[in-house]
Image (spheres, coloured by chain):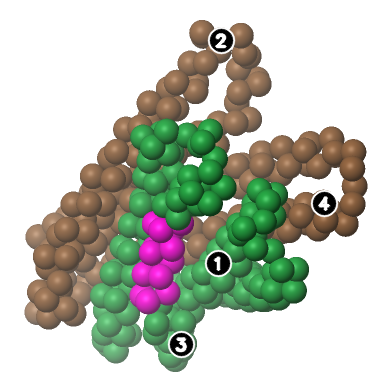
Chain colours: A green, B brown
Amino acid sequence: MNAFIEKNRRLLKIYCIAARTIGWVLLITAVVFAVVKLFSGFSVDEQHRSYMLYLLYQQLTLSFVLLGLVLLGLAQFVRYLSESDYQPGWILRHGDKVLYLYAAILIISPVSHYYFQMTVIRNVRAVSLLLYFVSAVLPAVAKGLIFVGMAQALQRIVPMAEESKTLV
Amino acid sequence: MNEFIEKNRGLLKFYYIAARIIGWMIVFMGGIHLVWFLSEPLWRDVKWETILPYLPQNLQFMLGLVVLGIAQFIRYLSEKQYQPGWLLRHGDKLLYLFAFFQIVKAIGSCSNFTVLITSRTNYNLANVCQAVIVGLFLVFSTIATILILVGLAQVLRRLMPVIEETKTLV
């Protein structure tokens, strides 16, 4: 593994810098979105257009925060794997929780969206339950499972990497 | 780590069975969808050139492949005897390919979005703000997704020998 890292050190460094930059940009943008949302006063009980805009802002904020955290965690992990002196940062140490949260939000989001469609804005033209399950719920569950798997793997891999680092 | 695996064996087994079922369901349905999409010019009055740019939007089966790959990875981590399957052995290439399709998909979405915006006649501050937000979302989330996929591919390449090494240690 060390030979591989030595050969790709520059690429890994570029990757870490890019991931950290984009990760922070996402987090900052999410904060800006949240502030804009707070001051613009959109609420669910307004008309359909406002609701859609509300949903858009909410999804942007959540997606950006979580994507940003995952990206920063991954950058820390790549750095942890490639640098022998580097100690895992806060995000990496709590990476599994971030991933579980992301998975939960991914799975809940299409269900809550369907609930809002049917009850709050009473969109009777909404697609059939089966079609919605196939087109929205199933991919969301799959993505959720990817993140749960990543969290499980992370919990096992960090001690392994630590062990591998200490081997002479 | 072995202690952790022993403690969570039931949960891990449940996880990879669920992941395999969902993964195969998506591969199967995504495959049907792809065949249906590609055969459209045969039974509808559309040309290949018209539908091909939309191809990356119709590759949902790849999501299923990633889920199956993760299931294999978890199984590989938790079972000593288990040898990595084809998907896991080529997981890095699969992730790079997935990242490439994300780029193509984003280009397609950007061009559709540009057409939508330029076709609008009523320009006001709210519309412009909305367009900027959606545009930003598209660009940043695509870059982030690509970086996550590339990072995972890199990590996978490095970790497979480490896991193998750990398994052979007494």
In the structure shown, which secondary structural element does the residue marked by tag 3 occupy? helix
* In the image, residue B35 lies in the stretch drawn in magenta: no
* Residue A33 relative to residue B98: left or right: right
Q: Amino acid at mark 4?
A: Asn
Instruction: Give the residues in magenta.
Output: A96-110
**CA distance separating discs 1 and 3:** 20 Å
Chain letter of the residue carrying label 2 = B
Mark 3: give few (<14), some (14-19) or many (20+) Cα within 10 Å: few
| Residue that mark 2 sits on | B44
**CA distance separating discs 1 and 2:** 40 Å
Which residue appears at 64% of the width and 54% of the height?
A: A51
| Residue that mark 1 sits on | A62
Q: Amino acid at mark 1?
A: Leu
Q: Residue B44: where, in percent of width, then height? A: 56, 10
Chain letter of the residue carrying label 4 = B
Of the residues tagged 1 and 3, which is closer to the observer? 1
